[in-house]
Image: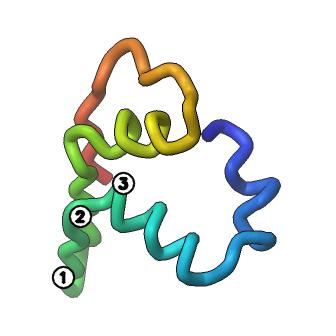
Amino acid sequence: MLQIDKIWDQLFPAEQERIVRLLIKKVVVTPHNIEVQFMPNGLERLAAELNLPAPKEAVEVAA
């Protein structure tokens, strides 16, 4: 996942959307702020699909 930017443009738009939907729960846009809420288990689900080891520690991030 640390190098997703290297292959992102090679993915079909439908696959890009599917990955984003696995990772992001909600985006709230206001005139002065953007809040991104991530799925609590999004990285674990994506790792499972890619047969990668799950992240050791789940961290909630708000942007």
> On the rendered structure, is 1 left or right of 43?
right
Q: Which mark is residue 50?
A: none
Which residue is farthest top? 56
Task: Say whether disc 2 or disc 1 marks the residue closer to the N-terminus.
Answer: 1
The kind of residue on which mark 3 rests is Leu
Q: Residue 34 in the image: state x and y as whole percent.
A: 28, 70
Q: Which residue is mark 1?
A: 30
3 or 1: mark nearer the eye = 3
> On the rendered structure, is 18 left or right of 29?
right
Whole-number angstrom distance, CA of label 2 to CA of label 1:
9 Å
Asked if disc 3 and disc 1 are in contact, CB closer than 8 Å, the reply is no
> On the rendered structure, is 24 left or right of 9?
left
Which residue is more in the foreground, 30 or 42?
42
Q: Residue 35 in the image: state x and y as whole percent.
A: 23, 64
Task: Say whether disc 3 or disc 1 marks the residue closer to the N-terminus.
Answer: 3
2 or 3: mark nearer the eye = 3
Q: Residue at x 22, y 86 (%)?
A: 31
Whole-number angstrom distance, CA of label 3 to CA of label 1:
21 Å
Asked if disc 2 and disc 3 are in contact, CB closer than 8 Å, the reply is no
Whole-number angstrom distance, CA of label 2 to CA of label 3:
14 Å
> On the rendered structure, is 24 left or right of 49?
left
Q: Residue at x 76, y 72 (%)?
A: 9
Q: Which residue is mark 3?
A: 23
Instruction: Classify mark 1: helix, strand or loop.
Output: strand
Task: Say whether disc 2 or disc 3 marks the residue closer to the N-terminus.
Answer: 3
Q: Residue at x 71, y 64 (%)?
A: 8
Q: Is residue 61 above or below residue 17?
A: above
Q: Which residue is mark 2?
A: 35
The kind of residue on which mark 1 rests is Thr
Instruction: Classify mark 3: helix, strand or loop.
Output: helix
Asked if disc 2 and disc 1 are in contact, CB closer than 8 Å, the reply is yes
- Figure quadrant of residue 3: top right
